[in-house]
Amino acid sequence: MKFLRLAGALLATIAATLPLSDAARGHGLEPALLALRERAPGRFEVTWKSSKLRLPGAEVRPTLPDRCRQTADAPQATDDGDRIRLRWVVDCGTAGLAGQTIGVADLDVATIDALLRIERLDGSHVETVLTAHHPSWTAPQDPTREELVRHFARLGGEAAIASLDRLLLLLGLLLLLAATPRRLLQAAAAFALGHAAAVALIGIGALTAAARSLDLGIAAAILFVALELTRSPLSARRRSAWLVGLLFGALSGAACATSLADSSAASLDAPLAVFAFTAGVALPQLAPLLLALAFGGILARRRPRAATLATRCAAYAMGILAVFWCLERVTA
């Protein structure tokens, strides 16, 4: 019995001390916050929030790049109960934070994490968690013009490969007008003009377009071309090649601009990014179109009936795909 009383007393003592230890650990585990918001080129407003309670030997503090110098503006301190908030402004020069390392010291001693948030002047932002094992983060270097061109050309190529419907739209327009080179050139010029106008208008914010509506419009345009290819002789709409090319170019350009907007080109050299992205979209599409034009020209000269049959088969295949895409995109 004496042993049971001693064991009960020991368990009661442990149970009574557990809440105290949990509370102490709770304060020690509160994460810190380091936020840098760019107010002017190279000038950042720094916000630092941390707990007033510190473990012995822990001096949790932000470590900014050497190039970032505090301005003459007086730091501001705010008492938030058990936390303190400091705010000051630093000037990191014209290069900003590109390639620089930002961190928080003594995270391992304090056994806490810190949230790092950086917002640039163009609206782009990054958030990451600094830990005892990774107490710092290095901002990426600003890309060179060559890297920018390669990056957006690759994005454009990936968008072109993933967009079978846009390639079919161009192929259908080629089949529709291949027999009349003058109308084909008119349509090509009008297509380029419509494409460029749509990209420019969406790029400057004068026009907005929903991706779903654009996808449905492209599917409907493919269906229109497929129907035109089955008609004989030439219809009045086929004779208005420039108008067809202009409308199709605007559709394609709007879809291209929407894809480009998702890649944050606005935060970089926008004109160069648009040019590289458009070139990246055009090049993968140009090769199959030229191949189809060459093969179709040879077939039309040597086997006219076979060329007519191939065109009709292509029209029916495009029409079936277009109907499927229209139904899919209406019900999506």
Image (cartoon, rainbow, N blue to C red):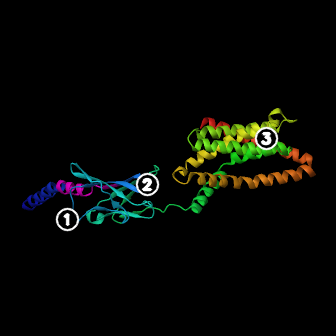
Query: What number is the disc on residue 108?
Result: none
The x, y position of residue 246, in whole percent, is 72, 40
Check if residue 25 falls in the magenta segment: yes
- Looking at the image, residue 209 sits to the left or right of residue 235; the answer is left
Between marks 3 and 2 in the image, the one whose residue lies nearer the viewer = 2
Q: Which residues are magenta?
A: 19-34
Category of crowding for the residue at label 2, using alpha-carbon neighbours closer than 10 angstroms: few (below 14), some (14–19), many (at least 20): some
Quarter-wise, where is residue 182 in the image?
top right
- Looking at the image, residue 81 sits to the left or right of residue 161; the answer is left
Element class at badge 2 = loop
| Residue at the front extreme of this rendering | 72
Element class at badge 1 = loop
Q: Which residue is mark 2?
A: 41
Give the residue drawn at x 69%, y 52%: 282
Query: What number is the disc on residue 56?
Result: 1
Element class at badge 3 = helix
Give the residue drawn at x 64%, y 41%: 215
As rendered, which of 198 and 68 lies closer to the eye? 68
